[in-house]
Amino acid sequence: MIKLVLASRNKKKIKELETLLGDLTSKVQVLSLDDIGYTDDIVEDGDTFAANSRIKACVPARLGYIGIADDSGLMVDALDGAPGVYSARFSGEGATDEKNNAKLLAELENVSDDKRSARFCTVVTCAFPDGSDFQVEGVCEGTILRAADGDGGFGYDPLFYYAPLGKTFASLSADEKNAVSHRGKAMRAFAKKFKEYIEANGDN
């Protein structure tokens, strides 16, 4: 049985990964940081999503497991890619979704509607005990509105308008969002690549 450690303590993320791996769950056991007794905080001090994702995935890898981690954020063109890796703490100490959204709207107040393009990005890293790894990325293009719309989702979802469905991320159902979101794309790409790894390497 292959032990795959998701560098998270989020039970929903564990369940999501098990679902994505499908029939591979007979060969793969998905564990959390809690399951392997890792209690320290992981310092995410990288300057890109790829770097932070790798930092997290390498924690279980250094302990002899196959590690997987993701890092995500919002990149706004008019702000030169900000908030980027600082998406969760854009408004500074004590940041909340509401404060982050308020700061984003303030920063874009004088930006015209045709210049408010943005994208959500996720990078997933799979790190191995031998020091090797692979990364996959998921991107979803959208536009930042001038006011929040929708009461679902989290983070910047109420401001992120996804034109193909004519809604903000906060107005999508969970299934709709997962089908088109950056994280959904990245996790499906990881699952596909990991299945190829299993087929090439067997159960070792």
Image (cartoon, helix red, strand yellow):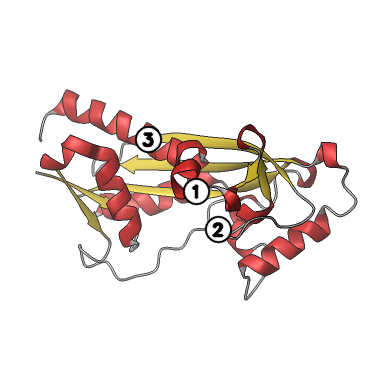
* Front of the two marks 3 and 2: 2
Q: Which residue is mark 3?
A: 188
Circle 1: element type: loop
Q: Which residue is mark 1?
A: 173
Residue type at numbered disc 1: Ser
Q: Quadrant of the C terminus?
A: top left
Where residue 125 appears, as percent x and y from the top left, is 39, 42
On screen, 83 above or below 75? below
Q: Are marks 3 and 1 in contact (CB under 8 Å)?
A: no
Residue type at numbered disc 2: Gly
* Front of the two marks 3 and 1: 1
Where residue 150 appears, as percent x and y from the top left, is 63, 56
Characterize the local packing of mark 3: few (<14), some (14-19) or many (20 or more) Cα atoms within 10 angstroms.
some
Residue type at numbered disc 3: Arg
Characterize the local packing of mark 1: few (<14), some (14-19) or many (20 or more) Cα atoms within 10 angstroms.
few
Quadrant position of residue 161: top right
Where residue 124 appears, as percent x and y from the top left, is 42, 42
- Kindly identify the residue that appears in the image at 33 percent across and 41 percent down: 126
Q: Which residue is mark 2?
A: 152
Q: Earlier in the sequence, mark 3 or mark 2?
A: 2
- Kindly identify the residue that appears in the image at 84 percent across and 41 percent down: 113
Q: Is residue 152 visible?
A: yes
Quadrant position of residue 136: top left
Distance from disc 2 to disc 1, alpha carbons, whole Å, reads 8 Å
Where residue 85 appears, as percent x and y from the top left, is 59, 52
Circle 3: element type: helix
Viewer-closest of 55 and 119: 119
Q: Are marks 2 and 1 in contact (CB under 8 Å)?
A: yes
Distance from disc 3 to disc 2, alpha carbons, whole Å, reads 22 Å
Q: Quadrant of the N terminus?
A: top left
Circle 2: element type: loop
